Amino acid sequence: MKGQLPPRESEGEPFVFLDLGCGTGFSLVVLASLYPEGRFYGVDFHPDHVAHGLDLARRAGLKNIEILEADFLELAAPDAVLPWAAGGCHYVVAHGIATWVTAPVQAALLAVAAASLRPAGLFYCSYNTYPGWLARSCFQQLLALDLPAAHPGGSGPRFHDTARLLHQLLGDEAQPSPFGASYPSLRRELQSVEFAPVDYLCGEYANEGWAPLYVTEMFARCKAHKLSFLGSATYSESFLELLPPPLRDLVLQEPRIEARELLIDLATNKAFRRDLLTKGQVRLTHQEWLERLRPVSFQLLQPQEAWLANPSDTLHFRACFGEIQGDPQAYGPVLSAISAAPSSLHSLLSACQQSPGELVVMLSLLLEAGGIGFDRGPAAAKAAAQVQRLNQLLLGRIQEGRSYTQLALPAVGSAIPFSVLEALIYRAQREQLEEPMLSSCVLLWLKETNVQLIGDGHQVILEAPAQLLKIQEIAAILKATKVPLLERLGGVPTPTPRLKASRSTRSRNRAPAPPES
């Protein structure tokens, strides 16, 4: 898309993928199941994380993944032997690591990434950035004074106490203090602390090396390791022509790439970046660019009516710089073609009156919004069996209350969110329970796993009638959308129609007895 020679010639080719700071390994395991042609390596400093990832991979029967306990400083040492082939990785990722570690560890992270990449390989790096974190840096500084005094397991109150203290320093909304007037967005940003899990808050704020960076600072540090910026991994941020006119004109006048990115970050108050960098660039000619894009194919993820219930409706896409509006006369034929069958860019160019550049932008916005996904073609069939095995494992563990949150879709090489409530409803639907028994059983299972139902206003639903109503609402959506999507894209086997149950069988479909105390 950015005119750069990709690390692989075509979809389905073997590759090596390295995740630096893979955490519990969940995402890496999902990717390894989706891409059996890949060899996946994960590195993490915490032995609990490594043990969890290895156990999940073993249970899923995956053979193309290795997760290692290692330290970036050790891996970056001159005499270090990398467990994967040095200079052999097509892709290296570091998601949410770079600005949560101390400067020496960050330098080692970038050094390992550079040493591991093959020429023209891609490095994905996401990190906290200024100016978006300027206001919340006040929260982090106050918090850093209190956290060392917190007893084990007692960090949660410290976060909330610090947030309340900052609220007081902001003054009244009608009459803010000088501090509150300088950071008017902080009051709203602190609300996220109230609802965020303590695990997230600890991971986000309670690190010795917590230090957001301006994009120019990160680019300079990457450049020292021969890593050069290619573009954003967020589609809508990859096209300068989508910027609002005053900002677009200002940015286009700036020839330096790092200055352009800084201008955009300042104008949009950017707090988080997802950058793609390369180790050596090979630019494609316009003809080569078009030849490589033509076979790329797409599948529909959301029904067309979810996008264009009325053919005259304008489409709305969210971006960091505001809303992007899509012309229904342009998007309608594209969505209709992909709705009928998986469609390549070549076939879409023939069916739609768009230039290649315009069509690439449209497809990119639809990809970012989750309306379509990449079609893996024949490569998906090779992954289907092991993906379904992994999804069955995940469903069982989610139903037990485990904190897994996604199921894999082999046809598009990606995943969809799947909550514990949806997993329990799916279980009830597979057991052919019907209302009111279905919602009653699900509610009982939720109580057994100590999971609370949350309403639209982030409030816990306590009354039983409201709980049952919420379950019925989610069950209807799940049956109409996610379950058909999972079946169509190979995430779960298509169910075999059952014979109509006899009266004696139906009589056994009662809600399970409550557990004995």
Image (tube, helix red, strand yellow):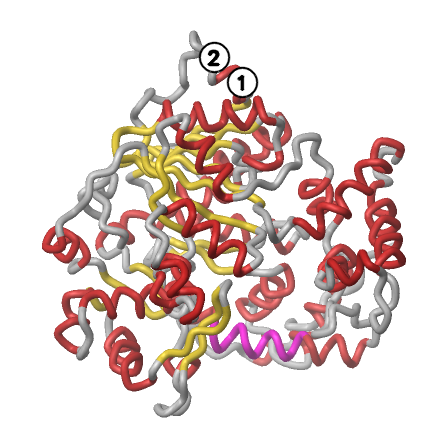
Which stretch appears magenta? Answer: 471-481
Q: Which residue is outermost to the top?
A: 79
Report if the CB atoms under discs 2 and 1 are less than 8 Å apart.
yes
In the picture, measured across the screen, residue 203 lies left or right of residue 276, that is: right
Q: Secondary structure at mark 1?
A: helix
Q: In the figure, 399 relative to 103: above or below?
A: below
Along the viewing direction, whichever of 399 and 292 lies nearer the viewer:
292
475 falls in the magenta region:
yes
Name the residue located 56 percent from the left edge and 79 percent from the top edge: 476
**Chief secondary structure of the magenta span?**
helix
Residue 90 shows up from this direction: yes
Q: Quadrant of the C terminus?
A: bottom right
Q: Quadrant of the N terminus?
A: bottom left
Q: Position of residue 309 (x, y in %)?
A: 41, 88
Along the viewing direction, whichever of 387 and 326 lies nearer the viewer:
326
Q: Position of residue 155 (x, y in %)?
A: 83, 41
378 falls in the magenta region:
no
Q: Secondary structure at mark 2?
A: loop
Q: Quadrant of residue 91?
A: top left
In the picture, measured across the screen, residue 480 lies left or right of residue 87, that is: right
Q: Quadrant of residue 367?
A: bottom left
How far apart, in angstroms, are the residues tagged by discs 2 and 1? 6 Å
Residue 77's disc is 2
Q: Quadrant of residue 206?
A: top right
Check disc 1 and report the residue beneath it.
73
Name the residue located 28 percent from the left edge and 60 percent from the top edge: 375
Q: Position of residue 266 (x, y in %)?
A: 54, 55
